[in-house]
Amino acid sequence: MSVLRQRFLGNFICMAVTVTGAAAAFPQTRNSPGGDMSPSHPMPESQQPADSNLPVPQGFQTPEQGALVDAVDIARDPSDVAPPLGDRPPQLVKVALTAEELEGKLDPAMKTTYQYWTFNGKVPGPMIRVRQGDTVELTLKNEGHLVAHSIDLHAVLGPGGGMGVSEAKQGETRTFTFKAMRPGVFVYHCGTDLAPQHISNGMYGLIVVEPPGGLPHVDREFYVMQGEIYTADDMGSEGHQKMSLPKLLNERPEYFVFNGMVSGASGGHAMHAKVGESLRIFFGVGGPNIISSPHIIGEIMDRVYPEGSFTAPPLTDVQTTVVPPGGATVLELQPLVPGTFRLVDHALIRVARGLVGVLEVSGPANPELFHAGPAR
C-alpha cells in the first residue's frame, strides 16, 4: 500500500468513533509524531522531471547536502499565541527576529528530515501582536550561513513591506521602524530572492494588528499556518530531503503541512479545548503557491473574518472558507460536544500529503445534540 493511501485511510477510516461522556481516545496514525531521530543518511535524489532543465531563477540557493546534524522539532505549537492586548493606548513595540537555518523533522513517522529556514527556529515564525497606531521597531538578525534573509510584512505601508531595509547578509543585523496603521491579520515572510524558496523553507508568520479596544474575549486562541514543501524525492522517502527547483517552479509540492511539518498541528501538537469554550484560530497561508479551503470536520464556524479584516463584519455559520497564499483569516467556534475534530483543507487529498490538524475537545456528552444510534 502506498504512503499516500496509508495516510489517507489512517486519517479518515479510523474516524468512525463513538463518543460517550468525555472525549474518546483517538488511535494514533502515521501522522503521530515519533521519538527522537538520529542523523539520517542522505537519500539519492529521485529522477528529475523532463522540465528539470528550466533556467534557474536569480537568487535560487542550491540545497546543501553535507554532513547532517540531529533533526529538531521545528513546528510552532498552535497554542503558542501572543497574548491579547486589551484596551491600551498606542505605544512603542520592539520586535526581535532571528533568521535560523536548521535541520528539522519533516515527517517523524517516516524519519524524514529537511533543511528549514526559519524565523526564531520555528515554523511559522512567532506571532507579532500589536495595536493599531503602535510604532513597531523590528530588528532582524541573520544567524544563517547560506544566504541573506529579510522580512516583508503585509501590515507595513512602505516599499517592499520592509524587505529592502531589513535584508541582512550572513552575520548581519538590520533594524527598521513602521507604524501599524490598519487593523487585521497579516502575513509576513522573507522577501529575499528567490522569495518562494525562502517561504517554502519555512520563513513566514502572522502579524495581528488589533483595533482600538482590542478583540472580543475568547477562552482559547490558536495559531495555525499552512505551507508547502517541494522535496526532490517522493513523499514518504526516509532521510534528509533536498528541495526540488522544478517542482517549486511548477507548483507541485510533495508535502502540504500545518505549522511546518507532518503532525505540526496533531499528535503532540494537537489543539485542546473543553466543551462550551469559545475558541479563536488565527489561520494563515504561507504557501507560497496553493490556495487553502480550511474546514473543521464536525463543526460549523460561528464567525469567520474574511481576508483577516477586522473592519468588515464577519461571516457567520460558515462550513468552509478560502484563504489565498499570503492571506489570513480568523476562525471562531464553540464546540458543544466532546470528541476529536479534524482541521483540514477541504481539497481533501492533501490530507494524504500530511495536511491535518486535530482539535481534542473534552467534557460531558451532549446526547440531545449528538449521539450514536436511533432517535430517543
Image (cartoon, rainbow, N blue to C red):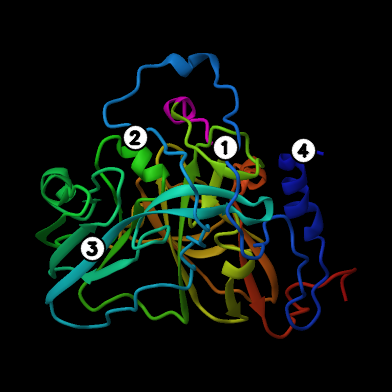
The percent position of residue 259, horizontal first and vertical second, equals 48, 57
Q: Which is closer to the viewer, label 2 or label 4?
A: 2
The percent position of residue 265, horizontal first and vertical second, equals 56, 62
Residue at left offset 46%, top offset 65%: 76
313 on left or right of 135: right
Name the one closer to the observer, 64 or 153.
64
Residue type at mark 2 is Gln
Residue 250 painted magenta: yes
Q: Which residues are magenta?
A: 246-253
Quadrant housing residue 18: bottom right
Q: Which one is earlier in the sequence, the residue at label 3 or at label 1?
A: 3
The residue pinned by badge 2 equals: 61
Residue at left offset 53%, top offset 63%: 301
The residue pinned by badge 1 equals: 254
The residue pinned by badge 3 equals: 183
The residue pinned by badge 4 equals: 2
Q: Which is closer to the viewer, label 3 or label 4?
A: 4
Name the one closer to the observer, 114 or 371.
114
The CA span between labels 3 and 1 is 35 Å
The CA span between labels 2 and 4 is 31 Å
Residue type at mark 1 is Glu
Residue at left offset 54%, top offset 81%: 277
Residue type at mark 4 is Ser
Q: Which one is earlier in the sequence, the residue at label 2 or at label 4?
A: 4
Tell me whether the residue at label 4 lies in contact with that at label 1, contact meaning CB atoms closer than 8 angstroms: no
Q: Which is closer to the viewer, label 3 or label 1?
A: 1
Q: Which one is earlier in the sequence, the residue at label 4 or at label 1?
A: 4
